[in-house]
Image (cartoon, rainbow, N blue to C red):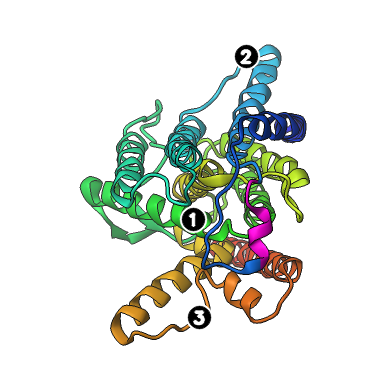
Amino acid sequence: MWQILIAGAISLTVAILLTPILIKVFSRQGFGQEIRVEGPQSHQTKRGTPSMGGVAIITALVAGYFGAHLVGFIVHGTGPRASGMLVLGLAVALGIVGFLDDFIKIRKHRNLGLNKTAKSVGQFIAAILFGVLVIQFRNDAGDAPASTNLSYVRDILAISMGSIVFVVFCWLVVAAWSNAVNFTDGLDGLAAGSMAMVLGTYVLVALWQYDNACVGGSAAVGNPGCYHVRDPLDLALLAVAGGGACLGFLWWNAAPAKIFMGDTGSLALGGLLAGLSITTRTELLAVVLGALFVAEIVSVVIQIAFFRTTGRRVFRMAPFHHHFELGGWAETTVIIRFWLLTAIACALGLSLFYGEFIAASG
C-alpha cells in the first residue's frame, strides 16, 4: 500500500519540477498557443502562452507508475501488471496523437492541427489495439484485464457483447472520453483540476476492489459482493500517478495559466480515464464520476445538431463553459463552480459504488 504514496509523490514532484522547464524551453522556441478568433475576447490575451504541457503530465505519469514499481521490485520482487501497462500504453499512445496535433498547430501558427480524419484514425488505432489486447492477456487463473460484459460497478452478466463488439465498444469509449476531456480543456486549470478529482476517486475505487477482491482480498472470504477485477492495486497505482501528475501540472496551469496541456495532455488523460473505467469494470459509473466531461461533449453535440437542423444555437458558444463566460461570468468563477460540480459528481459516484457493494454483500 505504501507504493501508492510513492507513486503519487514521484508524479507530483516530476510534474511540478518539469513543467517550469518546459515553460522556458517552449517560450524560447516560440511554441505558443493559438486562440480561436470567435472565442471570448478575454482569451485573446492568452495567445502565445506555451502549449504541449501534456508532455509533463505524461512524463510524470510514467515516472510515478514505474518509480513505485521499481521500489516494489527492490523490496518485494514484484513488477508492473498487464492491466496497468495496457492502460498506460493507451494513455501514452493517445498522448502521441495529441502531441502531433499540437506540434502542427504550433509550426503552422493556426488553431487547427491534425485534421479530423487523421486524429480519428490515431484514436481508432490506439483504441482497437487496447481493446484487442485487454481481453487477451490472461493470467494463470484465466482472467483477462477486462471482460466483454458491460459494467456498472461490476459486470452486468445479462449484457455480454462478445469479442468483436467489445473491441468496437472500446473504440467508442476511448473516443468519447478523450474528446470529452479535450473539449473541457478550454479554461485555465479546468481539465487538470477536474481530472485530478476523478482520478483520486478511482484510487479509492481500485483500492476498495483490491481489499475486497474475490481472490486474495482481506475481506473476500464469504463475501458475495467481492470484485472480479484483475490487478486492482496496479490500477490504483496508475490512477494515483495520474492524479499526482495533474496536481503538479495544475500548480502552473491554474489561472492565470503559464502553460496549457494541449491535446497532448487532454487526449492522454481521456485515454487514462477510459482505460481505468474498462479495466475496473465501471464503464457506466465513470459517466457519473466524469459528469462534467460528459456535459461538455454533450453540449458540443447539441450545439452542432441544433444549428445544422434549425440554423440557431442553443448555447452562446460550445463547449458550454464558454456559454457562461459570454454570459458575464468571470473565468475563475466558471472554473471554481465546475470544480465544485466535479467534486459533487465524484462524491455521488462513490456513494453509488459503496451502496452497490452493501447491497451485493447482503
Q: Residue at x 72, y 48 (%)?
A: 253
For label 1, the SS is: loop
For label 2, the SS is: loop
**Along the polypeptide, which appears first: circle 1 or circle 3?**
1
Q: Residue at x 63, y 46 (%)?
A: 48
Q: Is residue 45 magenta?
A: yes
Quadrant showing the C terminus? bottom right
Q: Is residue 59 magenta?
A: no
Is residue 118 left or right of 153 when viewed as pictured?
A: left
Q: Are marks 2 and 1 in contact (CB under 8 Å)?
A: no
Q: Residues within 10 Å of mark 1 (few under 14, many from 20)?
A: many
Is residue 104 left or right of 157 when viewed as pictured?
A: right
From the viewer's side, name the closer residue of 5 and 63.
Answer: 63
- Corner quadrant of residue 137: top left
**Along the polypeptide, which appears first: circle 2 or circle 3?**
2
Closest to the camera, between mark 2 and mark 3, is: 3
Mark 1, residue position: 282
- Mark 2 is on which residue type? Gly
Q: Which residues are magenta?
A: 42-48
How far apart marks 2 and 1 lie (CA) works out to 30 Å
Q: For residue 315, which numbered disc appears in the image?
A: 3
Closest to the camera, between mark 2 and mark 1, is: 1
From the viewer's side, name the closer residue of 317 and 190.
Answer: 317
- Corner quadrant of residue 30: top right
Mark 2, residue position: 77
From the viewer's side, name the closer residue of 96 and 77.
Answer: 96
- Residue 213, horizontal then vertical, whole percent: 56, 43
**Along the polypeptide, which appears first: circle 2 or circle 1?**
2
- Mark 3 is on which residue type? Phe
